[in-house]
Amino acid sequence: MIIAIDGPAASGKGTLARRLADHFDFAYLDTGKLYRAVGLGVLRLGGDPEDEDAAGDVARNLQPSQLDDDELKSDAAASAASKVAAIETVRAALLDFQKSLAANPPGGKKGAILDGRDIGTVVCPDADVKLFVTASVEVRAERRHKELLQRGETSIYERVLEDLKERDARDSARAVAPLKPAEDATMVDTSAMDADQAFEAALKIASPVVAEKLR
Ligand code: C5P
């Protein structure tokens, strides 16, 4: 049982995916972390995230321990992630790990939830449920801005808005696995929803499918 959740940055898909995974007791993989870890790895080696050879090397040698790093949440990691994510060899190196976790969820779980940009289109095209979670770029920027302030970081709304627009453009325009809804995905626009309402909306879509599949 696989639930694929895609959408742009700060759409609320991560929070939603985690809550659904708790609710159904499924495994959860935030695939953005993989790209962030590659981006950060390249930066730490003093390399350029747009350098195919450097990014490909880091992706092929990625270790699970690199996914537990507070720096992954930083804007620098996010921006580097969206650069390495446009490189085909990087995506290829990360694909097997994602596919095998979806096919064999760890801990004996009966299902897996993956969130990212290309889960419904490339990683798990046969997923049982596909959600595409969106919100207007202004709402997403406001959410990200508040989150940064809550974490005690300095943040300027206009700057966050520009960063998100840049990342959206890079993720949507790239040639390999661009950010786009799968043809059979259900759209969930969270612009006017809080986290609880988004969760309820997603449950309505996923619950009947999960009940039928695990019957
Ligand atoms: O979701 P998150 O903001 O952590 O993702 C960071 C970056 O990683 C995205 O901007 C995107 O470029 C890339 N990414 C991707 N495919 C995924 C997940 C993330 O290209 N499945």
Image (cartoon, rainbow, N blue to C red):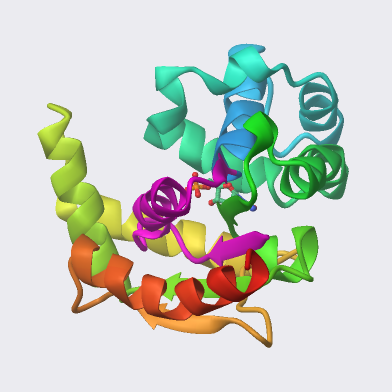
Q: Residue furthest bottom?
A: 183
**Left of 88 or right of it: where is 36?**
left
- Rendering coords of residue 165 (x, y %): 41, 64
**Residue ID at (67%, 79%):** 182
- Rendering coords of residue 80 (x, y %): 57, 37
Q: How many marks?
A: 0
**Residue ID at (23%, 61%):** 195
Which is more toward the observer, 197 or 45?
197
The answer to whether one can see residue 21 in this image is yes
Q: From the image, which quarter does the C terminus lie in?
A: bottom right
In the rendered structure, which segment of residues is drawn in magenta? 1-30
**Residue ID at (87%, 45%):** 92
Residue 21 drawn in magenta: yes
Residue 130 drawn in magenta: no
Q: Quadrant of residue 63?
A: top right
Which is more toward the observer, 208 or 69?
208
- Rendering coords of residue 42 (x, y %): 67, 22
**Left of 203 or right of it: where is 96?**
right
- The image shows residue 79, relative to residue 1, as above or below, that is above
The answer to whether one can see residue 118 in this image is no
Which is more toward the observer, 83 or 196?
196
